[in-house]
Amino acid sequence: MKTITVRLPEALATWLSRRARDLGRPQSELVREALQRVRAGKRGVSCHDLFADVCGVIHGPKDLSANPKHLSGFGE
């Protein structure tokens, strides 16, 4: 594995140090994973990813946006 040196602003270096300590993982591992996510095009977690465990659990009419009767009085 190749070693590089990266200069970070003080605030970012402090955050990285705290985050690594909180997770019990080396800073280099966190930086490596972040770079791999960017390389793979995964810049963040989507809204669906955050709510995946509750998707599809709400019961009610399935045609709320398409049936005009559900929109009567909306915006008045």
Image (spheres, rainbow, N blue to C red):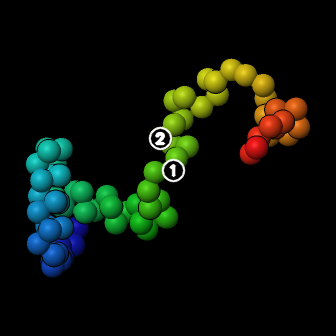
Q: Is residue 57 left or right of residue 17?
A: right
Q: How many marks?
A: 2
Q: Circle 1 sits on which residue?
A: 46
Question: Which residue is located at x 47 percent, y 59 percent?
Answer: 42
Q: Residue furthest right?
A: 68
* Residue closer to the observer: 65 or 8: 65
Residue 61 in percent (x, y) is at: 78, 25
How many neighbours does mark 1 have within 10 angstroms: few (below 14), some (14-19), or many (20 or more)? Answer: few
Q: Is residue 38 above or below residue 60?
A: below
Q: CA distance from mark 1 to mark 2?
A: 7 Å
**Residue located at (68% from left, 20% from top):** 59
Point 44% across, 56% down: residue: 44
Identify the image quadrant of the N terminus: bottom left
Name the quarter where the C terminus is drawn: top right
Seen at 40% across and 60% down, the residue is 37
Q: Amino acid at mark 2?
A: Leu
> Foreground: 17 or 76?
76
Q: Provide residue 8's location: percent of width, then percent of height.
A: 16, 75
Q: Which residue is mark 2?
A: 50
Front residue of 63 and 26: 63
Q: Residues within 10 Å of mark 2 (few under 14, many from 20)?
A: few
